[in-house]
Image (cartoon, rainbow, N blue to C red):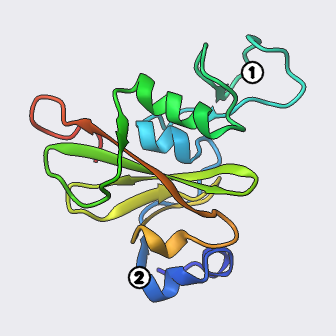
Amino acid sequence: MRDSILEELCPRLADGGYEVKSPRDPKYNCIAFAVGDLSQYWDVIEGVPKGVRVKGYYWPDGVPSPETLIGWIKVFEVHGYHETDDSSLEPEYEKVAIYASADGPEHVARQKASGIWVSKMGKGADIEHTLESIEGEFYGKVVKIMKRKCQGGRRVLE
């Protein structure tokens, strides 16, 4: 199934090949999807005082702002990830790729056991894609790869 809106936002998608894996769902976003939380949107709402919880939204206590790359890196560090320069498939590791533009972090993708990358596209669908196919003006480029050892010899998320 093709998605013309996604292809407009990420023109390289059509050339890189992708597959829509779920219907649109505004309940969660790419960060939530990457850590395996499909129940809430990981972000803060501008104007809401720090520490005040808003139903359906979550950001970990003690983690810098989601507007910063360090905030996104810390989210994954809290979940056991550490930085690496290697985006290739390493079967004993789970990996995420953080995309950023000049404005800051924009997106994160997760690598599946097959080596394919999977993403939650904003409030839209989950898709499988190549790492480079969503780079561009909308999401920026991959600026950080992070990995964690598979738990009990197998991936926690797939």
**Foreground residue among 54 and 104:** 104
Query: Residue 73: x percent and y percent?
Result: 51, 35
Task: Name the side, left or right, on which 108 lies relative to 154.
Answer: right
Residue at x 14% of width, y 51% of height: 91
Query: Residue 121: x percent and y percent?
Result: 58, 59
Mark 1 secondary-structure assignment: loop
Residue type at tag 1 = Val
Q: First in sequence: mark 1 or mark 2?
A: 2
Residue type at tag 2 = Gly
**Foreground residue among 152 and 89:** 89
Disc count in the image? 2
Foreground tag (1 vs 2)? 2
Quarter residue 16 falls in: bottom left
Query: Residue 33: x percent and y percent?
Result: 47, 43
Q: Which residue is mark 2?
A: 17
Query: Residue 47: x percent and y percent?
Result: 90, 25
Mark linked to residue 54: 1
For residue 146, above or below residue 9: above
